[in-house]
Image (cartoon, helix red, strand yellow):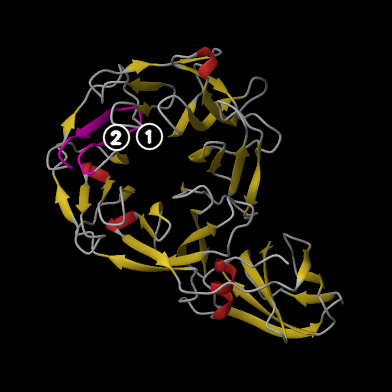
């Protein structure tokens, strides 16, 4: 039989805010500026960057953070380190300027570097080794083979200038990389989601389109992208959908398929994805419940085949996370907030309740629950919101359809947890319109 993931069991054991797959503890960043990105090279040493040139560093896992002098007042939006000494940070103010910084002493000193002849802000930086790295703007890609001393503007296979919105880049090695964003539609108005891959067979310095596929929501904008192994990558954006690609060959050319669709009634922006191993990973988004905003962190232990019910952190806005190891992650957000996450010590249980169907989804006033259990027995249910609070409970017999009135719920994302007398469990997400 299949096994319920660690995260499902952690959510079910308790219904309070402490019911987390991972435990998330706040840290004192010593700053109040908005933090836009975080990067750790191991479980101890990391940096976070933010507005007005903010850079902070820790060497003890975040027990203490110290402010570093960046030398810029531009907003820093992305940071990337190769080792404890060598790192880069980039950012800017949209169309009114940009900044790229380099350090070779762990951030004790930061030096501005010249990348390209553009006024557009730099949106992402990624180094695959000490010498090789990429920095992107909305419409351009720049690469270096000499640790950032000189930069080359790379080309596209076809003419795609104008209407580009490159947002994120991820590298597997010095040659193979993928980039996500959006592109103007070839016919009609508006944009469409886009993935570019670095084409080795037309190398050097050439990118080809790899992401106009039927599985992409046509209104999406890819905001984050992550290479999770030699044949696997993930991308996500503004429509609450994580796309997964697995392929064999020298490039990440697809096909791309939906790994999870949060099915939010409105936009549910996914801000970041991080995979410390090929199979273990996480992403974060957000939701509002009763006037409070929550950062939501979903986990997978099977390379995106299934995803957990989410962890929640109250009042953490516009978070971005990084997991350097399978047992550590950090997430940062507005007003200098930082949280450190570690896995909860919860076991894994067998799943006997199976074939659950909750419909319609999204739903209006009622939902129907159908399931096939290993035996016909009494099933208890609980309706939970995104924070784990119990909103309703009841019971009925399995192998029968049960109709549940949800008219009392506000519009949003909810979960229904099912448990029979043998403590077999199942959790299903649904949307109240």
- Count neighbours of disc 2 (C-alpha within 10 A) and say few if under 14, some if 14 to 19, many if 20 or more: many
Say which quadrant the C terminus sits in: bottom right
Residue 90 among those drawn in magenta: yes
Q: Position of residue 309 (x, y in %)?
A: 58, 65
Secondary structure state at the residue bearing disc 2: strand
Label 2 near label 1: C-beta < 8 Å? yes
Q: Which mark is residue 124?
A: 1
Task: Return the residue nearer the eye: 211 or 204.
Answer: 204
Q: Residue at x 50, y 30 (%)?
A: 178
Q: Position of residue 86 (x, y in %)?
A: 22, 37
- Residue beneath label 2, please? 90
Magenta segment: 84-106
- Count neighbours of disc 1 (C-alpha within 10 A) and say few if under 14, some if 14 to 19, many if 20 or more: many
Q: Position of residue 8 (x, y in %)?
A: 59, 69
The answer to whether residue 366 is seen in the rendering is no
Does 253 sit above or below residue 153? below
Q: CA distance from mark 1 to mark 2?
A: 7 Å
In screen coordinates, is 203 left or right of 105?
Answer: right
Quadrant hosting residue 399: bottom right
Q: Residue at x 65, y 72 (%)?
A: 409
Quadrant hosting residue 373: bottom right
In screen coordinates, is 246 left or right of 123?
Answer: right
């Amino acid at each position: 039989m299949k096994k319920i993931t660690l995260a499902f069991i952690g959510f079910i054991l308790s219904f309070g805010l402490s019911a987390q797959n991972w435990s998330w503890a706040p840290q004192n960043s010593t700053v109040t500026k908005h933090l836009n990105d975080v990067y750790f090279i191991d479980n101890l040493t990391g940096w976070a960057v933010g507005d007005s040139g903010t850079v902070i560093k820790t060497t003890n896992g975040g027990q203490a953070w110290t402010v570093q002098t960046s030398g810029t007042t531009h907003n820093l939006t992305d940071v990337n380190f190769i080792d404890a000494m060598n790192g880069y940070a980039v950012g800017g103010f949209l169309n009114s300027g940009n900044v790229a910084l380099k350090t070779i002493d762990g951030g004790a000193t930061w030096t501005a570097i010249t990348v390209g002849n553009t006024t557009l802000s730099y949106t992402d930086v990624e180094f695959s080794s000490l010498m090789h790295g990429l920095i992107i703007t909305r419409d351009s890609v720049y690469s270096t083979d000499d640790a950032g001393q000189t930069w080359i503007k790379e080309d596209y296979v076809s003419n795609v200038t104008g209407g580009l919105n490159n947002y994120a880049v991820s590298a597997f090695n010095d040659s193979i990389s993928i980039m996500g964003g959006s592109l103007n539609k070839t016919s009609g108005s508006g944009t469409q989601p886009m993935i570019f891959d670095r084409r080795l067979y037309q190398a050097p310095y050439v990118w080809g389109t790899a992401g106009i596929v039927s599985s992409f929501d046509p209104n999406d904008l890819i905001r984050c992208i992550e290479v999770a192994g030699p044949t696997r990558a993930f991308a996500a954006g503004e429509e609450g959908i994580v796309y997964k690609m697995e392929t064999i060959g020298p490039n990440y050319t697809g096909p791309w398929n939906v790994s999870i669709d949060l099915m939010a009634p409105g936009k549910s922006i996914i801000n970041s994805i991080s995979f410390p191993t090929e199979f273990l990973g996480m992403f974060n988004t957000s939701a509002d419940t009763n006037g409070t905003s929550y950062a939501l962190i979903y986990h997978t232990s099977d390379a995106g085949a299934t995803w957990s019910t989410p962890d929640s952190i109250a009042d953490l806005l516009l978070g971005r996370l990084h997991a350097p190891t399978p047992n550590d992650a950090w997430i940062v957000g507005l007003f200098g907030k930082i949280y450190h996450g570690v896995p909860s010590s919860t076991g894994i249980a067998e799943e006997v309740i199976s074939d659950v169907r909750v419909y319609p989804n999204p739903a209006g006033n009622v939902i129907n629950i159908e399931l096939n259990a290993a035996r016909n027995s009494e099933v208890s249910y609980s309706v939970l919101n995104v924070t784990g609070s119990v909103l309703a409970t009841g019971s009925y017999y399995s192998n029968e359809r049960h109709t549940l009135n949800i008219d009392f719920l506000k519009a949003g994302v909810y979960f229904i947890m099912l448990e029979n007398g043998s403590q077999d469990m199942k959790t299903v997400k649904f949307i109240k319109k």
